Image: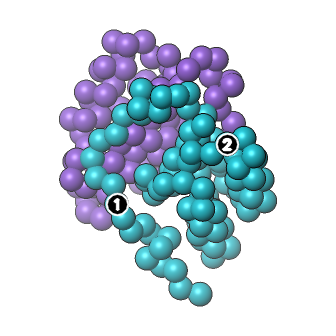
Chain colours: A purple, B cyan
Amino acid sequence: MWVVVCYDVNTETREGRRRLRRVAQICKNYGQRVQKSVFECQVDEMKFEQLRKKLLKEIKLELDNLRLYRLTEPREKRVEQYGAVRTVFFDEETLVV
Amino acid sequence: MWVVVCYDVNTETREGRRRLRRVAQICKNYGQRVQKSVFECQVDEMKFEQLRKKLLKEIKLELDNLRLYRLTEPREKRVEQYGAVRTVFFDEETLVV
């Protein structure tokens, strides 16, 4: 199944910026980045469960927001895409410790 | 039908930041903001067509990215939501001319 992961991590603090990088890193292991904070992941129920669990462990519910959208197949009928897809994103550019 | 609008507007320039505000403003007229750059809109085909047209007029295809996801009903079975939904967003805070 196709799942769209959208997150809004509060990056006002250093800890928030770290969470943002970690959330992006988790998503990268499950799918394709399509926007700064949007990933499209093709997963089965088990992988989806894993992904959700990892993300919920990372985000702070009182500061961040996470949304998971399940698309019905075929994906092509559900998604419209316009414009440029960047290949390098902020949290990757600033991957300093 | 429910449509999820996700955008990634390049805000490196002043013109980009203006585009971002305009795109947000368009979306506000069609739905509910759920993240910084994600809106959920309940629209019929005509409204959807209008929304798409307005957004495509605003974004710069070579710099920005726009994705429209159509959710199948019932919406509740398609969306999982975790954490805080902010009420004030960056482009609103900085609405200075």
Q: In this rendering, would A25 be left or right of B25?
A: left
Query: Closer to the N terminus: mark 2 or mark 1?
Result: 2
The image quadrant where one finds the C terminus of chain B is bottom right
Horizontal relation, residue B39 to residue B23: left or right: left
Check whether the beta carbons of the residues at disc 2 and disc 1 lie within 8 A of each other.
no
Q: Amino acid at mark 1?
A: Arg
Residue with the mark numbered 2:
B44
The answer to whether residue B3 is above or below residue B37 is above
What residue is at 51 percent from the left and 47 percent from the top?
B40
Q: Relative to B22, is A94 above or below?
A: above
Q: Is residue A14 left or right of residue B66?
A: left
Rendered location of residue B54, percent (x, y): 74, 58
- Residue A4: give x, y in percent of width and height: 49, 32
The disc label shown at residue B52, or none? none
Q: Give the percent coordinates (x, y) of residue A11.
A: 33, 59
Q: List the residue tagged with mark 1.
A: B86
Q: Residues within 10 Å of mark 2 (few under 14, many from 20)?
A: few
Quarter of the image where one finds residue B3: top right
Q: Secondary structure at mark 1?
A: loop
Q: Amino acid at mark 2?
A: Asp
Residue A91 visible in the picture:
yes
Tell me what residue is drawn at x 60 percent, y 62 percent: B29
Comparing A97 with B80, the one in front is B80
Q: Is residue A74 above or below residue B56?
A: above
**Left or right relative to B44: residue A39:** left
Location of residue A39 in the rendering, given as x and y in whole percent from the top left corner: 49, 35
CA gap, disc 2 and disc 1: 27 Å
